[in-house]
Image (spheres, rainbow, N blue to C red):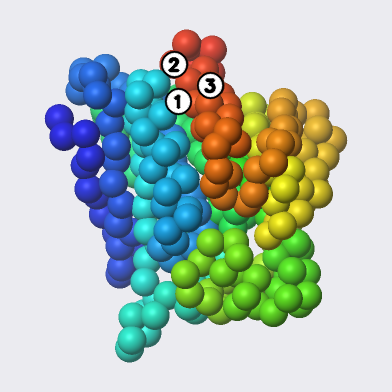
Amino acid sequence: MERRQPFAVEIANSAVSGALHWPPEHRQDDPAAVVLLCHGLPRAGKRTGELFARITESLTEAGLAVAEYSARRANLPDGSNHQRLAVELIDDASAVFRWLVLRDELDLTRVGVLGFSLGAIVAAGLAQRTDQIARLCLLAPVTAEGVLSGADRTGRDEYIRSLGADDAVEGFLADLDTLDSAQSAAAHDRPTLILHGAADRAAPPELSFAYAGAIELAGRDVQHTLVAHADHFFAADPSRTACVAQVSAFFGAMNDGSDRKNRS
């Protein structure tokens, strides 16, 4: 099987496109654990793409499949992505997640989700909708309230670009006041890892404490770590190496059988 397998998931007269990255030694008769990556943008910017490429390489080397995708394009004459609502981006992630759990070559009891930056809001929204997520990881997470506050403080376009968008994402902010991403992440019981750069100037580390606090208050299993000297994108080593190693170890636990669940 090819190590990179493109896919398209139809939804609402459009499609979410992406790719499945397979472990080097994957056999089709041995269902693999898989991690869905969410960046919360119409398309990943360069800095986000570089981080996700490093995470994908590490996870596949650890024996896990990785799914990455781009959101649907808005139905506008110019094909602009700018009007997509946050809830619509959660719908996209939900569609890809459903597609993954229905594939015979993947193990539906070992599906993890990773949300980075704005993608933490998307991942949390998805985590509220289903209890089938085995493990949840939030990297440099922002909350809905934090994004609105940051946009007011520094200007919408400048703030969203600081979180990894190449272009302004106008519609994303329109419905954020209807979402409580921290509570969404705590809706179901699953191991959760939260990593945040201690030197993150785009998204203050305090934002991740909202997630950790809500998950702890709900009596869930959460590990919250601040990575020394790391910026929002964990751009420089050794912070990137430390981040990727923790992510790989966290999701790698799905391969030892401890996260298997009986389908209800």
- Tag 3 secondary structure: helix
Say which mark, if any, is on residue 45: none
Mark whose residue sits in front, 3 or 1: 3
Whether the residues at callouts 3 and 2 have beta carbons within 8 Å, the answer is: no
Please tell me whether residue 227 is drawn above or below residue 161 in the rendered image: above
- Would you identify the image quadrant in which residue 172 lies? bottom right
Q: Is residue 107 visible?
A: no
Which tag, 1 or 2, sits closer to the chain's start?
1
Q: Which residue is mark 3?
A: 249
Q: Which residue is mark 2?
A: 255
163 or 1: which is nearer to us? 163
Whether the residues at callouts 1 and 2 have beta carbons within 8 Å, the answer is: yes
- Would you identify the image quadrant in which residue 17 lies? bottom left
152 or 111: which is nearer to us? 152
Q: Which residue is mark 1?
A: 110
Mark whose residue sits in front, 3 or 2: 3
Residue shown at 73%/33% (left/top)? 224
In this rendering, position of residue 155 left or right of residue 171: right
Residue shown at 20%/23% (left/top)? 28
Q: Position of residue 242 (x, y in %)?
A: 58, 30
**Kind of residue sitting beneath label 1:** Arg
In this rendering, position of residue 27 left or right of residue 226: left
| Residue located farthest toward the left when viewing the structure as drawn | 1
Which tag, 3 or 1, sits closer to the chain's start?
1
